[in-house]
Image: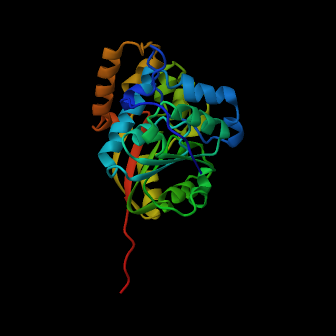
Amino acid sequence: MQIAPGRLGRRPWCEIWRSDARPRWRFPYVWDVAEETWASASLAKRFADDAYATVKGYVRTFVMHQHLLENLPGPPARLLDVGGGAGHQSFPLAEAGYDVTLLDSSAVMLEKARQRLEALTPQAQQRVTLVQAQGQYAQEAVNGELFDAVLCHGVLGYVEDPESFVEQLCRCARSDGVVSIMTGNARTTAIQPALERRWNDALAAFHCAIGTGVLGVRGRADTVDAVGDMMRSHGVEPQRWYGVWLFVDWLEFSGTQLDPDNLDEVGAIAAVELEASRRDPYRQLSRVFHLVGRKRAPRLHA
């Protein structure tokens, strides 16, 4: 484990991702495809830098941040972010007072995380620990420590054995702790190819839970019920679920260009997406879903 030193003064979390005059909103989507994949500096740059500099990236980060604040215990609770990449989702939580352990298998992504730590306040940097390990060995990598919340966002669709992976997440949560999983929505895999007028692909997508992520990496989508069942079988009771990415996805796939410099529009889009994330039928039509559960206390035997 490594704790990075602190340097910079305090700024609001939404300002952390700016570079010069251009807003650089970023979001996590694909991390743990394979260690060799993330060893590629070009893919890491596309993921950790370019992909976050979009309206879609800001919406993703903002909506997920609000969901987490609604469900996490208050700071200074201890959080484990499994497959946390360069820290785009968990670093704002460190700024908010949480103690964050970010675990990722990629040395390239962790180097990006170290670089981005310099944008945090000195106090927040001291609350961040970086661990290089594969998510399927998370419990061993953190020496059996238990956390108030375990986050795993944008990873599950890229692991070979999702059941054992979810078991690891649940094992790392303390009794009454939160487990937060965000992954692709298998109910909506036909939307992207249809809006891109790839009609044969859209037709096939009705019968296939495999899709292509924002960086062109293919992965598996899941359902809320299926992931909820995995959680439940490992002692975590699903409590709430949300949609993530609805209108911005449809606009992008239909060819509309959104300007990340138009902050008034970006803020309005984010507000609409947040509201849609909580409501039916909108959340059911979202590109990905966010499922939050709570670990049950162990039964006491007489």
Residue 36 located left or right of residue 49: right
On the image, the x and y values in percent for residue 95 come to 40, 39
Residue 249 visible in the current orientation: no
Which residue is nearer to you in this view: 163 or 107? 107
Which residue is nearer to you in this view: 268 or 142? 142
Q: Quadrant of residue 245?
A: top left
On the image, the x and y values in percent for residue 135 come to 59, 51
- 138 to 130, vertically: above or below: below
Write the residue at 34% across / 41% down: 67
- Count of numbered tags: 0
**Which residue appears farthest toward the right when viewing the image?**
36
Picture quarter with the C terminus = bottom left
On the image, the x and y values in percent for residue 81 come to 50, 47
* Coloring applied to the structure: rainbow
Residue 74 visible in the current orientation: yes
**Which residue appears farthest toward the bottom when viewing the image?**
302
Q: Quadrant of residue 237?
A: bottom left
On the image, the x and y values in percent for residue 83 come to 55, 44
Which residue is nearer to you in this view: 168 or 103? 103
Write the residue at 47% across / 21% down: 24
Q: Quadrant of residue 46?
A: top right
Residue 98 located left or right of residue 28: left
Residue 24 located left or right of residue 217: left
Write the residue at 50% across / 56% down: 169
Write the residue at 64% across / 45% down: 105
Which residue is nearer to you in this view: 182 or 72? 72
